Image (spheres, grey):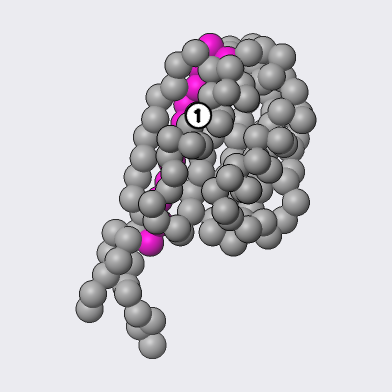
Amino acid sequence: METINFGEHLMIDGYGGNFEKLNDEESVRKCLDDLVVKCEMHKLTETKVFFAKGNDTKDPGGWSGYVLIEESHISIHTFPGRGFLSADVYTCKNDMETDLIISHITEIFQLKETEINFVKRGTRYPSQNLL
């Protein structure tokens, strides 16, 4: 049976971000909402953003947000005290516009540096229903 690539997963770790932007609920919400539009995706739910208090180890707390989309999900977790951000964009669409996404997140949170990981998901996804 022929297989196709199911989707793509972009992971962005951002360093040296702006404390105020990383510590702002509306910046997280706007970033997620804008990405849905810019990537021509379709919301299944409204964007959700929550404050996550830190613990006494490596997590100083910050904002966590996500939006479920027909194509999968987008999530962002900020750590203002460390100037750090972690974002995931996972979609069943192929040919993701990674440069656009990276640029958008970098600009909103004024990141000085990014670490990027990109994975093709479901590389043995069947091209037809099995039953």
- Going by the picture, which residue comes out furthest to the bottom? 131
Q: Residue furthest left?
A: 1
Q: In the figure, is residue 32 to the left or right of 25? A: left
Asked whether residue 75 is drawn in magenta, I would say no
How many numbered discs, if any? 1
Residue at 65% in and 35% down:
31
Q: Indicate the quadrant containing the C terminus: top left, top right, bottom left or bottom right.
A: bottom left
Q: Which residues are magenta?
A: 6-17
Image quadrant in which you'd find residue 130: bottom left
Quarter of the figure with residue 56: top right
With respect to residue 19, does 120 lie above or below?
A: below
Q: Position of residue 92 (x, y in %)?
A: 45, 59
According to the picture, the residue beneath numbered tag 1 turns out to be: 103
The x and y percentages for residue 32 are 65, 40
Task: Answer whether residue 7 is magenta in the image.
Answer: yes
Say few, some or many: other residues with alpha carbon within 10 Å of mark 1 (under 14 / 14 to 19 / 20 or more). Answer: few
Above-or-below relation of 64 to 1: above
Image side of residue 112 versus residue 128, left or right? right
Q: Position of residue 87 (x, y in %)?
A: 53, 34
> Which quadrant of the figure has residue 48?
top right
- Which quadrant does the N terminus fall into? bottom left
**SS for callout 1:** helix
The rendered magenta stretch, by its main secondary structure, is classed as strand
Which residue is rendered at x = 69% and y = 19% of the image?
21
Q: At 68% from the left edge and 23% from the top edge, which residue is drawn?
A: 62
Q: Which residue is found at the position 43% from the left and 48% from the top?
A: 96
Is 106 positioned to the left or the right of 7 in the image?
Answer: right
Q: Is residue 11 visible?
A: no
User: The disc labelled 1 sits on which kind of residue?
Assistant: Ser
